[in-house]
Amino acid sequence: MTMLHGFKDSFLWGGATAANQIEGAYDYDGKGMSAADFVEYVPKEQRTGDNNMEMTSEKIKAILSGEYEGRFPKRDGIDFYHTYKEDIKLFAEMGFKAFRMSIHWSRIFPKGFEEEPNEAGLAFYDDVFDTLLSYNIEPVVTLSHYETPFGLTEKYNGWVDRNVIDHFVHYAETVFTRYKDKVKYWMTFNEINIINISPYTGGGIISDRETNPLKASYQALHHQFVASSLATKKLKQIIPNAQMGCMLARMKHYPYTCNPEDVLKAQHEDQMNLMYTDVHALGEYPNFYKKFLADNDITLDITDADLAIIKQYTVDYISFSYYMSLLSSTSPEGETTQGNLMNSLKNPYLEASDWGWQIDPIGLRIVLNELWDRYKKPLFIVENGLGAKDIVENGQIHDNYRIDYLEKHITEAKKAVQDGVDLMGYLAWGPIDLISMSTSEMTKRYGFIYVDQDDYGNGSKKRIKKDSFEWYKHLINTNGKEL
Ligand code: BG6
């Protein structure tokens, strides 16, 4: 038996992004609108929480009529649509082995339900992949990263409707066929669990159109599971050596105290978070989830054929985002803090970012060990990072806080490898500053590369290397050996 002392030679170092947070050009070259194009920036003083992403029928109507005065930063991103060649060159300079990006579904099928794809959209991604491959950077592609075409929301209220499965599979088949010689690593839905926290974000669902919104979000989730397995089936037919992954926003819950009631609650919340990877990796709905549905009087439309396809086409690897850990308590009194679309009680042992996300590097080692023990499938960290305000001083950005965060997390990932976990790679979230998913701010920056642009879209968009740029380059160059 050989144990690894560090990251394997083929370790996929790099960064991760989403089309809607970087590309801009929301209406160029035939692209249709997607869910993200309607998400508004609300200044901090006017926000009720971290998340302004839910949608109402009234708001959509007002936006569509042109009466609504708002700013929609994901329409403009950081203009990657026009700057990708220079941006990828900078990733290559850091030595990236992999770059995660999504295909904006509505660039390929503008409304989501057309038969024929939009050639200009396909050609754009051809060129992005060719540019990456010219530097030996593997594209890691997400099919759907909060980018449900708005046409599917209008026609079906998004993923609530079973018809969306066929449209997604048609889209997946189209891009697998087109990029079969260029892309080996795929994943279906970014953070698939978000659909039950924010149905609009995860599934293009306007909840006030549903009589039972909770049931609707779980029905939509079921459709995504079926669609994911059907896409995996297509992938294996079209690109036999390709790999399909799932993607979970891993939200590790610790018990707030050692009171067994708290421990039980934390276990339940953890099970509910892992349910998504259970289905993707093991091919079955777990019993605790069936009980959850029954306890909530939810009966879903699930056919035997659905269950058979979910069972047959499971994922090859498990990828996840990890930013923080959360606390579970049966008497949730005390100070709370914000998190990645979920708030938590404050953990007295942890510090938090300026946005309240609790920083817990050891939690990453715990999570890696648990996922490996549960599934015995290769794991891939496809998002991790610190959202922070950066200050430009004489043209430089000294982001030692970011280096500190990343170094601690990657060190724990290395310890997990030494524990025996099979880890494929590490992709830092937002290697270049981008629009925040939850707040649509620019101020919340994750990058090694600074983008001169503010929350209102003002700025030269000039790219500047931060101190973390050289640090990450060295880390990749030494394959993390000096940690
Ligand atoms: C993940 C998402 O939840 O967190 C990304 O997959 C997102 O899209 C990232 O950007 C960080 O969240 P935020 O809200 O700080 O942008």
Image: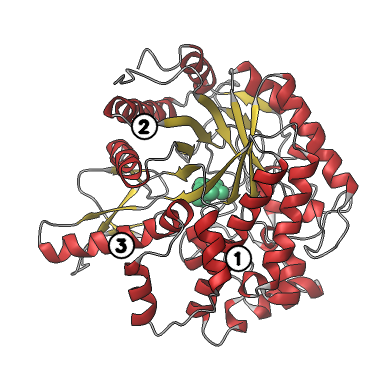
Residue in view at x 78 percent, y 43 percent: 177
Mark 2 = which residue? 409
Instruction: Report crowding for label 2: few under 14, some 14 to 19, many 20 or more residues within 10 A (C-alpha).
Output: many
Q: Quadrant of the N terminus?
A: top left
Mark 3 = which residue? 269
Q: Please report contact status of discs 1 and 2: CB closer than 8 Å, yes or no.
A: no
Q: Is residue 479 above or below residue 355?
A: above
Which mark is in front, 2 or 3?
Answer: 3
Label 1 to label 2: alpha-carbon separation: 31 Å
- Kindly state the secondary structure of the residue where label 1 is placed: helix
Nearest the viewer among 53 and 275 is 275
Instruction: Report crowding for label 1: few under 14, some 14 to 19, many 20 or more residues within 10 A (C-alpha).
Output: many
The part of the image, by quadrant, that contains residue 77 is top right
Q: In the rendered structure, which disc, 2 or 3, sits on the residue that comes first in sequence?
A: 3
x, y (%) of residue 323? 41, 44
Nearest the viewer among 432 and 282 is 282
> Is the C-beta of the residue carrying label 3 under 8 Å from the nearest atom of ligand 1?
no
x, y (%) of residue 321? 46, 44
Q: In the rendered structure, which disc, 1 or 2, sits on the residue that comes first in sequence?
A: 1
Tell me which amino acid carries mark 2. Answer: His
Nearest the viewer among 326 and 368 is 368
Residue in view at x 80 percent, y 41 percent: 178
- Count of numbered tags: 3
> Is the C-beta of the residue carrying label 1 under 8 Å from the nearest atom of ligand 1?
no
Q: Quadrant of the C terminus?
A: top left
Residue in view at x 30 percent, y 39 percent: 369
Q: Is residue 83 shown left or right of residue 337?
A: right
